[in-house]
Image (cartoon, helix red, strand yellow):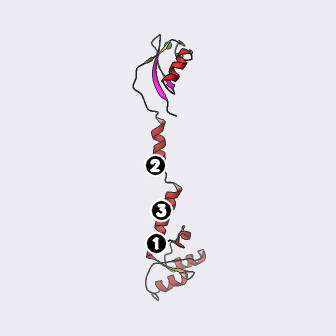
Amino acid sequence: MALKVFDLRCDNEHPFEGWFRSDGDFESQQTRGLLECPLCGSKQVRRLPSAPRLNLAAPAEHKQEAALPTAAQMQALLVKMAREIAANTEDVGERFAEEARRIHYKEAPERGIRGVTSKQEAEALEDEGINVMPLPFAHLLKDPLQ
Ligand SMILES: [Zn+2]
Protein backbone atom coordinates (compact mmCIF):
# COMPACT_ATOMS: atom_id res chain seq x y z
CA MET A 1 0.00 0.00 0.00
CA ALA A 2 1.37 3.41 -0.94
CA LEU A 3 1.55 5.94 1.84
CA LYS A 4 1.79 9.70 1.65
CA VAL A 5 4.46 11.48 3.64
CA PHE A 6 3.43 14.84 5.09
CA ASP A 7 5.80 17.40 6.56
CA LEU A 8 4.28 18.34 9.90
CA ARG A 9 5.11 20.98 12.49
CA CYS A 10 3.87 21.58 16.03
CA ASP A 11 3.10 24.98 17.61
CA ASN A 12 6.66 24.99 19.00
CA GLU A 13 7.97 24.80 15.42
CA HIS A 14 9.36 21.25 15.72
CA PRO A 15 9.48 19.65 12.24
CA PHE A 16 8.56 15.97 11.85
CA GLU A 17 7.02 13.60 9.33
CA GLY A 18 3.77 11.71 9.34
CA TRP A 19 2.65 8.84 7.10
CA PHE A 20 -0.97 8.72 5.98
CA ARG A 21 -3.12 6.71 3.62
CA SER A 22 -4.68 9.89 2.21
CA ASP A 23 -5.39 13.58 2.83
CA GLY A 24 -8.61 12.52 4.56
CA ASP A 25 -6.71 10.17 6.86
CA PHE A 26 -4.48 13.06 7.97
CA GLU A 27 -7.44 15.39 8.57
CA SER A 28 -9.30 12.69 10.49
CA GLN A 29 -6.36 12.02 12.80
CA GLN A 30 -5.76 15.75 13.26
CA THR A 31 -9.36 16.54 14.28
CA ARG A 32 -9.45 13.54 16.65
CA GLY A 33 -6.23 14.75 18.35
CA LEU A 34 -4.28 11.61 17.41
CA LEU A 35 -1.31 13.56 16.03
CA GLU A 36 1.39 14.41 18.49
CA CYS A 37 4.81 16.07 18.20
CA PRO A 38 7.49 13.40 18.92
CA LEU A 39 9.71 16.03 20.59
CA CYS A 40 7.40 17.96 22.90
CA GLY A 41 4.14 16.03 22.82
CA SER A 42 2.13 19.00 21.58
CA LYS A 43 -1.09 18.10 19.81
CA GLN A 44 -1.22 21.44 18.00
CA VAL A 45 0.04 19.93 14.75
CA ARG A 46 -0.26 21.48 11.32
CA ARG A 47 0.71 20.29 7.89
CA LEU A 48 3.28 22.12 5.76
CA PRO A 49 2.77 22.25 2.03
CA SER A 50 5.12 19.76 0.36
CA ALA A 51 5.58 17.91 -2.91
CA PRO A 52 4.28 14.34 -2.83
CA ARG A 53 6.95 11.68 -2.37
CA LEU A 54 6.94 8.08 -3.53
CA ASN A 55 7.00 5.09 -1.30
CA LEU A 56 10.66 3.99 -1.53
CA ALA A 57 9.85 0.28 -1.17
CA ALA A 58 8.28 0.03 -4.63
CA PRO A 59 11.37 0.33 -6.90
CA ALA A 60 13.29 -2.33 -4.90
CA GLU A 61 10.48 -4.87 -5.40
CA HIS A 62 10.45 -4.30 -9.16
CA LYS A 63 14.24 -4.70 -9.33
CA GLN A 64 14.07 -8.09 -7.62
CA GLU A 65 11.36 -9.35 -9.97
CA ALA A 66 13.42 -8.42 -13.02
CA ALA A 67 16.58 -10.14 -11.75
CA LEU A 68 15.10 -13.59 -11.12
CA PRO A 69 13.96 -15.65 -14.13
CA THR A 70 10.78 -17.59 -13.58
CA ALA A 71 10.64 -21.40 -13.66
CA ALA A 72 8.91 -21.16 -17.05
CA GLN A 73 11.74 -19.01 -18.46
CA MET A 74 14.36 -21.49 -17.16
CA GLN A 75 12.45 -24.38 -18.73
CA ALA A 76 12.21 -22.52 -22.07
CA LEU A 77 15.98 -21.92 -21.99
CA LEU A 78 16.71 -25.61 -21.33
CA VAL A 79 14.36 -26.69 -24.13
CA LYS A 80 16.13 -24.28 -26.51
CA MET A 81 19.56 -25.75 -25.53
CA ALA A 82 18.21 -29.28 -25.86
CA ARG A 83 16.91 -28.54 -29.38
CA GLU A 84 20.29 -27.12 -30.45
CA ILE A 85 22.09 -30.19 -29.13
CA ALA A 86 19.55 -32.49 -30.80
CA ALA A 87 20.01 -30.67 -34.13
CA ASN A 88 23.79 -31.10 -33.98
CA THR A 89 24.13 -34.65 -32.65
CA GLU A 90 23.01 -38.12 -33.61
CA ASP A 91 20.98 -40.06 -31.06
CA VAL A 92 22.68 -43.46 -30.63
CA GLY A 93 20.76 -44.35 -27.47
CA GLU A 94 22.10 -47.37 -25.56
CA ARG A 95 24.99 -47.78 -28.05
CA PHE A 96 26.56 -44.52 -26.82
CA ALA A 97 29.76 -45.98 -25.29
CA GLU A 98 30.30 -48.37 -28.21
CA GLU A 99 29.73 -45.63 -30.79
CA ALA A 100 31.95 -43.14 -28.90
CA ARG A 101 34.80 -45.69 -29.00
CA ARG A 102 34.30 -46.43 -32.71
CA ILE A 103 34.50 -42.68 -33.48
CA HIS A 104 37.53 -42.25 -31.22
CA TYR A 105 39.40 -45.12 -32.90
CA LYS A 106 38.26 -43.91 -36.35
CA GLU A 107 36.12 -46.97 -37.05
CA ALA A 108 33.10 -44.71 -37.60
CA PRO A 109 32.69 -41.24 -39.18
CA GLU A 110 33.46 -38.39 -36.79
CA ARG A 111 30.29 -36.67 -35.57
CA GLY A 112 28.55 -35.48 -32.44
CA ILE A 113 26.56 -38.16 -30.70
CA ARG A 114 24.26 -38.30 -27.72
CA GLY A 115 22.83 -41.23 -25.82
CA VAL A 116 22.73 -42.99 -22.48
CA THR A 117 25.55 -44.65 -20.59
CA SER A 118 26.37 -45.67 -17.04
CA LYS A 119 28.61 -43.65 -14.76
CA GLN A 120 31.25 -46.44 -14.81
CA GLU A 121 31.16 -46.58 -18.61
CA ALA A 122 31.52 -42.79 -18.83
CA GLU A 123 34.57 -42.96 -16.52
CA ALA A 124 36.10 -45.74 -18.64
CA LEU A 125 35.62 -43.58 -21.76
CA GLU A 126 37.31 -40.64 -20.01
CA ASP A 127 40.27 -42.94 -19.13
CA GLU A 128 40.62 -43.77 -22.83
CA GLY A 129 40.74 -40.04 -23.62
CA ILE A 130 37.16 -39.79 -24.91
CA ASN A 131 35.34 -36.73 -23.70
CA VAL A 132 31.84 -37.32 -22.34
CA MET A 133 29.65 -34.38 -21.39
CA PRO A 134 26.85 -35.19 -18.96
CA LEU A 135 23.48 -33.67 -19.84
CA PRO A 136 21.46 -32.85 -16.72
CA PHE A 137 18.41 -32.19 -18.90
CA ALA A 138 18.58 -35.39 -20.97
CA HIS A 139 14.85 -35.99 -20.49
CA LEU A 140 14.18 -32.96 -22.68
CA LEU A 141 16.01 -34.62 -25.58
CA LYS A 142 13.52 -37.44 -25.97
CA ASP A 143 11.16 -35.50 -28.23
CA PRO A 144 12.80 -32.09 -28.45
CA LEU A 145 11.41 -31.18 -31.85
CA GLN A 146 7.75 -31.51 -30.99
ZN1 LIG B 1 6.94 20.06 19.28
Label 2 sits on a secondary structure element that is helix
Give whichever of discs 3 and 1 has the lower sequence position.
3
Label 1 sits on a secondary structure element that is helix
Label 3 sits on a secondary structure element that is helix
Q: How far apart are marks 3 and 1 (CA)?
A: 13 Å
Residue 93 position within the rendered picture, expressed as x and y whole percent measured from the top left: 55, 80
Q: How far apart are marks 2 and 1 (CA)?
A: 28 Å
Q: What residue type is labelled 1?
A: Ile
Q: Which amino acid does label 3 sit on?
A: Leu
Question: Would you name the residue on which mark 3 appears?
Answer: 77
Give whichever of discs 2 and 1 has the lower sequence position.
2
> Which residues lie in the magenta part?
1-21
Do labels 3 and 1 touch, CB within 8 Å? no
Query: In this view of the protein, which residue sits in the foreground, 108 or 93?
Result: 93
Q: Which amino acid does label 2 sit on?
A: Ala
Q: Which mark is residue 66?
A: 2
Residue 4 position within the rendered picture, expressed as x and y whole percent measured from the top left: 47, 28
Query: In this view of the protein, which residue sits in the foreground, 4 or 8?
Result: 4
Most frequent secondary structure within the magenta stretch: strand
Question: Would you name the residue on which mark 1 appears?
Answer: 85
The magenta stretch spans residue 13: yes
Residue 122 position within the rendered picture, expressed as x and y whole percent measured from the top left: 56, 76
Residue 55 position within the rendered picture, expressed as x and y whole percent measured from the top left: 47, 33
Query: In this view of the protein, which residue sits in the foreground, 93 or 105?
Result: 93
Q: Which residue is drawn at 46% across and 67% down?
A: 81
Give whichever of discs 2 and 3 has the lower sequence position.
2
